[in-house]
Each structure stands twice: as C-alpha cells, then as structure tokens.
C-alpha cells in the first residue's frame, strides 16, 4: 500500500472516530443538519407534516411518530464514509487525490444518508400504519434498510470508479 | 455465494465496525442491551446477505439463459461453410 493510500485510510478513520465522538454527545438540535432535510423528505414522500420540537427532534403528532437524534442516520453516514474510502483506495495515488476522495466520500455519504434514512422512516411509518410497529421489528427494519443501502451505495461507487478508470 | 460475500465484505465490515466494534471498544459491551442489539444487527446482516445472494444468483441464471437463447438464434442464421 502506498503512502497516500495509508493517508486516505487514516483520514477516513479520523473522520469516523470524530463522528462517533460527536454522535455520543449530540442532541437533536445539534443534528439538525441531518434531521431537517430527512424530515422534509419524509413529509413530502409520505404526506405527513413533521415539525421541529426543540430538544426532541421532528414530530408529527397526527401519526404519533418522532424523528429523534438516534434516528439521524449518522451511524450510516460514518459507515458509508468508511466503505467508500476503502472502495476508492485504488484511486488514491497522490496526497491530493487521497484528500479529494475522502472529501467526496463525505459528500456522497451525506446525500446517501438522507435518501436511505428517508426510505427507512417512510417504511417504518407504513409498518406502523399496518400495526407492525414493535421495537424489535423497527430495529430489524433499520438494520436491513441501512445495510442494504450501504451495499447498494458501495456497489454503485465501485462501478462508477471502475468505469471512470477504464475511460481514463 | 463466496463471490457475493467477497464483493459485500467492505460495506458489511464497515457497518459492523460502526455499529458493534467501536461501541464495544468504548465499553458498551458490558451493558446487557448491547448483546441484544448485536443479535439484531447480526440477524439483519444475515438476512441482507442471503437476500443479495439469492437475487444475485437468480439474476445471473436469468442473464445466462437469455444469452444462451440469443446465441442459439444467431447461430441458426449463419450460412453453412462455403456458401455466401
């Protein structure tokens, strides 16, 4: 492994560790940068009306559903940053390319988090409407949607990277 | 199956690192809820891998079947040797 690739991995690991530390202490208000677009997308997709409640997150009382800090998808975002950085390791041939790829991974992971989390919460709302709202089922649904989304994101990123490399 | 696991190894490992390894390293493993959480994460992973392997294999079989059908049709149009 070349030095820029090691640098890229260390950079991604540092982002992940810092993100985990931030998540441990972050409130719903701190995570507005993730919760607000997700709540907006869920509202548009499902016809619900999530509104911000200071300290709690985003709530729609008519469907008895709350998008709290733990639902922000930050864990998914960190996993996506790690997976994308590893997947794009072959392209990290210089220091600049390594930094650029990790930065792009952060951006892509942010957008993917909003998309996947919107799908997860919309599905959870559907399940709740059909009386399938047990906490264990909700947890399993979360793992399946997040991991499925992560695998799909990784496959797309690898495919795009291989196509770009073959055209270069 | 092994090929699918190899392709999915990175996202699955990244997910497990974030949801299980790092919390365990921070001392969460001593809490009772962590084992419960870990069980659901592992079950979810197993279901996702099984679903991707199943649908991937079905897709590969379908594509191979379509290719074989296409090749058969093409070869029927090829003229015998020596004829224009």
Image (spheres, coloured by chain):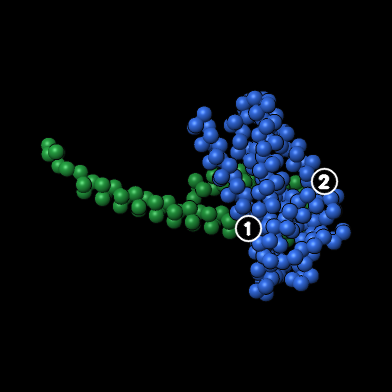
Chain colours: A blue, B green
Q: Which residue is mark 2?
A: A22
| Location of residue A157 in the rendering, given as x and y in whole percent from the top left corner | 58, 42
| Location of residue A32 in the rendering, given as x and y in whole percent from the top left corner | 80, 52
- In this view, A131 is above or below A11: below
Residue B62 vs residue A140, the one in the foreground: B62
Disc 1 secondary structure class: helix
Chain letter, disc 1 residue: A
Mark number displayed over residue A43? none
Residue A109 vs residue B42, the one in the foreground: A109
Q: Report the side of B58 relative to B23 (left or right).
A: left
Mark 1 vs 2, N-terminal side: 2
Mark number displayed over residue A144? 1
Q: Is residue B42 visible?
A: no
Q: Quadrant of residue A44?
A: bottom right
| Location of residue A105 in the rendering, given as x and y in whole percent from the top left corner | 67, 39
Instruction: Name the residue rendered at 84%, 50% in the picture.
Output: A30
Disc 2 secondary structure class: helix
């Amino acid at each position: 492994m070349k030095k820029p690739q090691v640098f890229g991995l260390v950079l991604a690991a540092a982002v992940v560790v810092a993100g985990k530390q931030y998540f441990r202490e972050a409130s719903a208000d701190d995570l507005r940068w993730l919760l607000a677009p997700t709540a907006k997308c869920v509202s548009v997709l499902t016809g619900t009306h999530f509104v911000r409640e200071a300290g709690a997150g985003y709530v729609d009382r008519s469907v008895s559903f709350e998008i709290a800090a733990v639902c922000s998808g930050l864990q998914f975002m960190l996993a996506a940053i790690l997976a994308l950085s590893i997947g794009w390791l072959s392209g990290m041939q210089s220091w600049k390319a390594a930094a650029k790829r990790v930065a792009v991974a952060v951006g892509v992971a942010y957008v993917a988090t909003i998309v996947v989390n919107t799908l997860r919460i919309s599905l959870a709302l559907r399940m709740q409407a059909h009386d399938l709202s047990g906490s264990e089922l909700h947890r399993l649904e979360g793992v399946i949607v997040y991991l499925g989304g992560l695998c799909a994101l990784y496959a797309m990123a690898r495919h795009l990277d291989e196509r770009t490399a073959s055209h270069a | 199956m092994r090929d699918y696991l190899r392709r999915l190894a990175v996202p699955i490992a990244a997910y497990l690192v974030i949801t299980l390894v790092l919390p365990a390293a921070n001392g969460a493993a001593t809490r009772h809820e962590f084992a419960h959480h870990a069980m659901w994460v592992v079950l979810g992973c197993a279901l996702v891998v099984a679903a991707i392997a199943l649908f991937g294999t079905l897709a590969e079989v379908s594509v191979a079947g379509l290719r074989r059908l296409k090749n058969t049709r093409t070869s029927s149009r090829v003229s015998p040797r020596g004829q224009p």
